Amino acid sequence: MKTWKIPFLDVKAENLRIKNDMFDVFERVIDSGEYIDGNETERLEEEFSHFFQTNYAVGVSCGTDALILSLRASNIGEGDEVIVPSLTFPATAMAVAEVGAKPVFAEIDRTLTLDVEDVKNLITSDTKAIIAVHWAGLMADISPLSELCKTHDLILIEDAAQAHGSLYHGCRAGSIGDFGCFSFHATKTLAALGNGGMITTQNIEYLQKIRLLRNFGRNGRESFICIGRNSRLGEFQAGILRLKLKNIENINNHRTAVANRYRDELGDWIYPPAVPNGFTHVYHLYIAQTHHRDFLYQELRKNGIEAVVHYREPCHQQPVFKKYANRKLPVTEKICKQIISLPLTLSYKSQSMVIETIKSIFINKK
């Protein structure tokens, strides 16, 4: 494994800072004798729904299951179509295929999230839902998407795996659609020690369906009333997430400060996506655009700085989705040749090194 001067993400360092508090959580859970479906999960669900401005939250095993269970709770399946952006981690579209539906890939706009006008043109009689991906920490333009769903009687699912705490005109990610789907993968801003997920909703009927589906379709101990799956969030993970949720605003503020400094000092060479008025970006990723992406990527890595590309190939160009991809998406394809993710979870001194290296790379290129 390559040792980087500046890694893209230092998961270990983030957890070491609260190591002693984590040990307190482990001791509390061990002493409780409840390791699944216990008090920690129940309390996390309450605290999560409060912070994210929703009536209900349901812990599940991962972010992908959050999407799958939301689709199943919406009775979406064979013969149905679900509109998704092509610029997203493939799990978004895989969840649609998993339930037997067809992912329909849409374009992105200047925020690198769903292009509302393109979505309008993709709605057919078979369309049953839209998944709005709040990508890299910035929410999609959710209000017009919500209006489209009301007009066409569609389900709106927010894929908020990368948007813990982001805002849209004062509303939290996950609070506007029929479902909000969150991931707690170890690399996420709000991260478990491994994996986990959460579904938010304002609707008690959806809440009841999700609770059934995440636990084998079980109603009581012996009665099974639908086909479900084993997708419960463990007590250790819930306890860790409760601990980290208390600090989510500080985490987001640090990431935003790092992102703002990149923007202010590197504006002559690279630029971030647009952040419209009323949107609050929480920078799960700092996505920069440049016409010299591949050159910059290679030079940074030569200098020991681990930059990452999210994503070189959009979903509609991935082999796994070949049968669903029936048109080109020129905006998405162009953007995927220009974007690069810079390290975010780093000190001021380390960021100075990244900034000076990028300046030097471009100055010497001339």
Image (cartoon, rainbow, N blue to C red):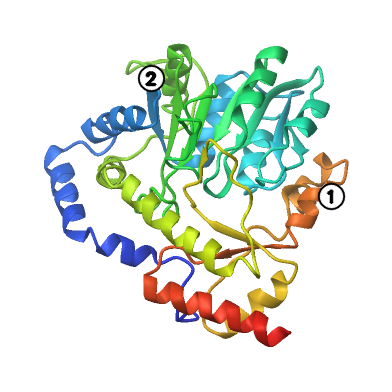
Question: Is residue 217 in sight in this rendering?
Answer: no
Q: Residue at x 79, y 33 (%)?
A: 118
- For badge 2, the amino acid type reads Asn
Above or below residue 276? Residue 220 is: above
Asked which quadrant contains residue 204, the reply is: top left
User: Which percent across, then down, holds residue 16?
Assistant: 26, 64
Q: Residue at x 21, y 60 (%)?
A: 19
- For badge 1, the amino acid type reads Pro
Identify which residue, 8 or 99, lies in the foreground: 8
The tag earlier along the polypeptide, 2 or 1, is 2
User: Marks 2/1: CA distance?
Assistant: 39 Å
Spot the residue most to the right: 327
Tell me the crowding category of disc 1: few under 14, some 14 to 19, or many 20 or more residues within 10 angstroms, Cα based. few
Above or below residue 314? Residue 246 is: above
Identify which residue, 144 or 329, lies in the foreground: 144
Q: Is residue 133 left or right of residue 226?
A: right
User: Which percent across, then down, holds residue 1?
Assistant: 49, 79
Numbered disc total:
2
Tell me the crowding category of disc 2: few under 14, some 14 to 19, or many 20 or more residues within 10 angstroms, Cα based. some
Q: Residue at x 28, y 36 (%)?
A: 36
Identify which residue, 277 or 212, lies in the foreground: 277
Q: Are marks 2 and 1 in contact (CB under 8 Å)?
A: no
Residue under numbered circle 2: 55
Secondary structure at badge 1 equals: helix
Q: Which mark is residue 205?
A: none
Which quadrant holds the C terminus?
A: bottom right
Question: Is residue 174 in sight in this rendering?
Answer: yes
User: Which percent across, then down, holds residue 267?
Assistant: 61, 65
Q: Which mark is residue 330?
A: 1
User: Which percent across, then down, holds residue 173?
Assistant: 48, 34
Q: Residue at x 53, y 74 (%)?
A: 306
